[in-house]
């Protein structure tokens, strides 16, 4: 459905319709009428479509309209489509087709009043406010500036309270219509809700003007939503208008106010009175002024012991039954009665007060939906004094119990209410009104309706106040206390001014030591500065046993925020340094923007370099590192770490080593100083600095053990990895065995690095530790000796060592292949004889046989065959002397 109003009229009345369209346009209502369609063309698809799409159908009735078949057809179509029809009588008699609809009298060419415009909006479910009307050709023409305060009102910030919407409930003057919502800036679905709620509150038979218990009244209700509280206040009074029968017309202005706290009923009533008067003057509703609405001041509304005692009784009674306060005067001002409501509500838990519906007046015999109402009741025979008790006996007025201001009622029939009043009075004797009211105001978690369950919850709130001091005393005396009791005491509460300082401190100390992450929130809300050392002890103890997880850190950050970072974290740093997880807690503090300047100065002092490095290690350019580097005293490596291109920064060797340690732990593999082509890896200063940082402090050793091997084994790592490890070993005072372990891993992954010069010590140590490395080194030595064509005795030494190290045949063959004599049977024969003499004793054929078994697998097949032929020739020459041994040698040659 569209948003415009369709005007049906006879062509003779077009002059009036133009004025009407302008009037509605000035009021913010979009209008369509067929001012440009010829009479013969009127029943067109354009007309039909505009009626189908309209929000409201207005027909201008006149003698000309009665005789117009086009008007008749338009009315019939609108009725068939179910459109809201609003007739205007311009002249003559009304139309038969709409005789069952109340019309507005505009005879003599006058324009309809504001109630007509308001009715259009209500019937349309909230017609949008526009400043134009729509012509037959689909174009728009400007007809006015619109009506202020007619559309959905902007949300104006007035100190935490804003006007969220309003509605006007009444009936048009001079008509036979019923009461309904005539105007509102609320959304259509909200209008229906306001209408239903208003009609449930309406007073039934209206009071006589100026009569006893009559207008004005103020009615209050509240609901809780995701964004806080929504207060609704109605102001009821006479409008000064009369209906068609001459009876006075009443009205109710409903104001919807969003707030983050309960508001004073007295202040709400005062604002509603002003808004009523403004609406009658110019049909607008003012926003509340900053500070105009706020929470009732308990010390003022409960001034005097007698009033506090009476309010405690009525508050307790309200938990069990609706209450009607009989007024002292004929017509008390609504603000005066609302002040009594403030006194009663102040002594109820906040979660209960939002359930209350209250009214400063009603003539209904019952309270209707109200928990508390002020108004007279019909006299009853049993009204008066109980002769035995000599005090007013509460009497029933329908569903309500009547009480009189200042007169304490008897609560004998309501034992739960009696218990609530007794406990409340005991608290008021022990604590100030402000302390008790603050505690009640924090009790927001309550059942969603009044009754026994709500009464039980309210009693538990009072018990928690009483229980605070008892639990605190037990803790001071070092008595056993269950943590559930302590949690119940502080749940949703503030301990300050409610328990003595010693008990307050004992409760928080217990929660710090025995509690979990969620308990830190209660500690933060009730923090005492003298507990900083306790927090440090608890943090250190939990960190030692691995009891600090993400949830605990998050709660600890909230506590530090309440206590002050410098006052809590600085003692923690002095006690623990920057071991895990202290830097993580500090990082959360920095991310939340909590001031910690003294901590930064402490970390940047020259004698705290190890702590600074530990705090930054593994973090990269995160908020903590940037915060530390933002200080002029920050070292160059820290500023480089905070920069986006930290990995590529060109720095002195010592600073490069410091920064590379950060990158290593952060998983940057390899860091620039250890990457291929880097000049740093062979630099003694670089190696010694990294050694001193990573192996000289237990905070880094574990990280180095994990990260350094991965960095040096990477394909993109430096070719001087073994030289770097050699110099780390040289610079390591403790000769840390992890360096040799790393060397073993690197040699295994990158054996080609053995050919790089200058790493003899670490290679020798690695070979001594690991069999695989020994084989790799032995094969490498054979290759070096073979390619250098060293004397035969030296080459024999290398091959013998490789054989004893059990170097694989394939590895040894590859190393031996570089020997210049590998294709010369004569030189190979000499090598066989030399090697055989090293491997075994005895006669020469046996030595040749032993040497041949080692050397033959290293030769190409063609060379091996030539060698075998040469040895056979030699064997024939030696056959006379070594017959048996030669036969064994021949057998070996045949097998190979």
Image: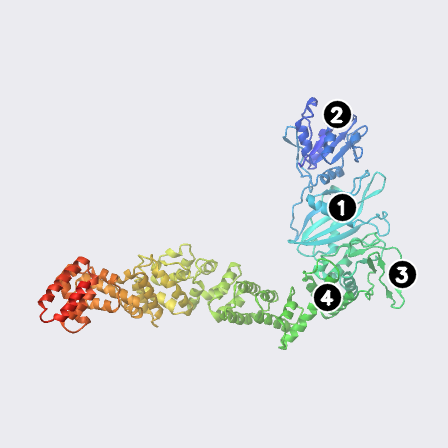
Please tell me which of labels 3 and 1 falls first in the chain: 1
Please tell me which of labels 3 and 4 falls first in the chain: 3
Mark 1 secondary-structure assignment: helix
Q: Are dots 3 and 4 in contact, CB under 8 Å?
A: no
Q: Are dots 1 and 4 in contact, CB under 8 Å?
A: no
Q: Which residue is mark 4?
A: 459
Query: What is the spatial separation of the Cα atoms under label 1 and label 4, in whole angstroms?
Result: 42 Å
Spot occupied by residue 333 in the image (x, y as percentages of width and height): 80, 53
Above or below, 323 against 216 in this view is: below
Q: Are dots 3 and 1 in contact, CB under 8 Å?
A: no
Please tell me which of labels 1 and 2 falls first in the chain: 2
Q: Camera-side residue: 882 or 282?
A: 882
Spot occupied by residue 531 in the image (x, y as percentages of width and height): 57, 71
Q: Which residue is mark 3?
A: 382
Query: For residue 277, which numbered disc appears in the image?
Result: 1
Badge 2 local density, few (<14 within 10 Å), some, or many (20+)? few
Query: What is the spatial separation of the Cα atoms under label 2 and label 3, in whole angstroms?
Result: 70 Å
Q: Which residue is mark 2?
A: 69
Whether residue 285 can be seen here: no
Query: What is the spatial separation of the Cα atoms under label 2 and label 4, in whole angstroms?
Result: 74 Å
Q: Are dots 2 and 3 in contact, CB under 8 Å?
A: no
In the picture as drawn, the residue positioned furthest to the top comes out as 40
Residue at 14% of width from left, 70% of height from top?
A: 885
Depth-wise, is mark 2 or mark 3 nearer the camera?
A: 2
Spot occupied by residue 260 in the image (x, y as percentages of width and height): 66, 55
Please tell me which of labels 2 and 4 falls first in the chain: 2
Q: Does 250 sit left or right of 33 as displayed? A: right
Spot occupied by residue 208 in the image (x, y as percentages of width and height): 86, 47
Q: Camera-side residue: 396 or 168?
A: 396
Please tell me which of labels 1 and 4 falls first in the chain: 1
Depth-wise, is mark 2 or mark 4 nearer the camera?
A: 2
Mark 3 secondary-structure assignment: loop
């Amino acid at each position: 459905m569209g948003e415009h109003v369709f005007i049906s009229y006879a062509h003779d009345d077009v002059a009036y319709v133009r004025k009407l369209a302008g009037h509605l346009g000035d009021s913010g209502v979009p209008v369509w009428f067929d001012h440009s369609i010829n009479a013969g063309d009127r029943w067109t698809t354009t007309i039909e479509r505009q009626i189908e799409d309209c929000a409201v159908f207005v027909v201008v009735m006149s003698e000309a309209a009665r005789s117009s078949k086009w008007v008749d057809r338009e009315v019939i179509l609108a009725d068939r489509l179910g459109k809201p029809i609003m007739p205007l009588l311009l002249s003559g008699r009304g139309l038969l087709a709409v005789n069952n609809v109340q019309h507005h009298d505009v005879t003599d060419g006058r324009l309809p009043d504001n109630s007509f415009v308001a009715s259009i909006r209500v019937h349309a479910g909230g017609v949008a406010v526009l400043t134009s009307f729509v012509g037959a050709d689909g174009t728009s023409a400007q007809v006015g500036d619109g009506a202020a305060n007619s559309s959905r009102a902007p949300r104006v910030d007035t100190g935490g309270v804003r006007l969220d919407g309003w509605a006007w409930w009444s009936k048009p003057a001079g008509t036979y219509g019923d009461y309904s919502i005539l105007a509102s800036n609320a959304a259509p679905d909200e209008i229906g809700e306001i209408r239903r709620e208003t009609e449930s509150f309406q007073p039934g038979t209206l009071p006589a003007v100026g009569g006893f218990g009559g207008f004005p009244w103020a009615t209050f209700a509240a609901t809780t939503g995701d964004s806080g509280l929504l207060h609704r206040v109605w102001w009821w009074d006479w409008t000064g208008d009369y209906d068609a029968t001459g009876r006075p017309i009443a009205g109710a202005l409903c104001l919807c106010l969003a707030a983050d706290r309960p508001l004073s009923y007295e202040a709400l009533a005062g604002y509603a009175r002003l808004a009523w008067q403004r609406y009658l003057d110019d049909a607008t509703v003012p926003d509340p002024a900053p500070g105009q609405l706020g929470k009732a001041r308990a010390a003022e509304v409960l001034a005097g012991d007698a009033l506090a005692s009476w309010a405690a009784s009525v508050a307790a009674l309200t938990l069990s039954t609706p209450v009607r306060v009989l007024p002292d005067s004929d017509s008390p001002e609504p603000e005066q009665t609302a002040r009594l409501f403030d006194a009663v509500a102040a002594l109820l838990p906040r979660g209960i007060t939002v359930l209350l519906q209250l009214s400063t007046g009603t003539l209904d015999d019952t309270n209707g939906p109200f928990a508390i109402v002020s108004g007279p009741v019909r006299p009853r025979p049993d009204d008066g004094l109980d002769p035995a008790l000599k005090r007013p006996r509460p009497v029933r007025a329908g569903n309500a119990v009547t009480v009189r201001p200042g007169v304490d009622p008897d609560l004998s029939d309501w034992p739960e209410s009696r218990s609530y009043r007794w406990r409340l009075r005991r608290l008021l004797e022990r604590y100030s009104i402000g302390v008790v009211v603050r505690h009640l105001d924090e009790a927001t978690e309550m059942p969603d309706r009044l009754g026994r369950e709500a009464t039980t919850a309210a009693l538990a709130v009072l018990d928690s106040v009483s229980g605070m001091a008892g639990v605190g005393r037990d803790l001071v005396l070092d008595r056993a206390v269950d943590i559930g009791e302590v949690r119940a005491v502080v749940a949703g509460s503030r301990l300050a001014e409610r328990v003595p300082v010693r008990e307050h401190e004992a409760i928080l100390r217990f929660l710090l030591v025995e509690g979990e992450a969620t308990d830190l929130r209660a500690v933060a809300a009730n923090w005492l500065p003298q507990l900083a050392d306790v927090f440090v002890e608890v943090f250190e103890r939990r960190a030692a046993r691995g009891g600090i997880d993400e949830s605990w850190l998050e709660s600890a950050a909230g506590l530090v925020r309440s206590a002050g970072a410098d006052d809590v974290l600085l003692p923690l740093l002095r006690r623990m340094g920057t071991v895990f997880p202290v830097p993580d807690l500090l990082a959360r503090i920095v991310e939340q923007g909590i001031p910690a300047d003294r901590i930064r100065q402490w970390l940047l002092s020259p004698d705290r370099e190890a702590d600074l490095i530990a705090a930054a290690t593994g973090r990269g350019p995160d908020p903590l590192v940037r915060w530390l580097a933002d200080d002029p005293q920050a070292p160059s490596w820290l500023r480089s770490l905070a920069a986006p291109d930290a990995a590529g920064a060109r720095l002195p060797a010592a600073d490069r080593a410091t920064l590379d340690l950060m990158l290593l732990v952060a998983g940057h593999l390899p860091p620039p100083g250890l990457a291929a082509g880097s000049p740093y890896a062979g630099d003694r200063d670089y190696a010694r600095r990294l050694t001193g940082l990573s192996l000289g402090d237990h905070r880094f050793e574990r990280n180095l053990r994990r990260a350094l091997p991965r960095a040096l084994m990477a394909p993109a790592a430096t070719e001087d990895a073994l030289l770097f490890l050699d110099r780390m070993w040289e610079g390591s005072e403790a000769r840390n065995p992890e360096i040799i372990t790393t060397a073993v891993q690197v040699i295994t992954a990158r054996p080609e690095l053995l050919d790089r010069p200058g790493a003899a010590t670490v290679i020798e140590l690695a070979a001594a530790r690991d069999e695989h490395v020994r084989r790799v080194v032995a094969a490498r030595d054979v290759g070096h000796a073979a390619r250098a064509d060293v004397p035969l005795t030296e080459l024999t030494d290398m091959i013998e060592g490789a054989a004893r190290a059990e170097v694989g045949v394939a590895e040894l063959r590859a190393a031996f292949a570089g020997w210049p004599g590998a294709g010369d049977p004569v030189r190979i024969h000499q090598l066989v004889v030399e090697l055989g003499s090293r491997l075994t004793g005895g006669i020469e054929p046996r030595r040749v046989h032993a040497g041949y078994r080692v050397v033959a697998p290293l030769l190409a097949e063609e060379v091996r065959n030539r060698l075998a032929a040469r040895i056979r020739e030699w064997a024939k020459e030696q056959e006379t002397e070594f017959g048996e041994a030669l036969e064994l040698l021949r057998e070996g040659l045949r097998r190979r």
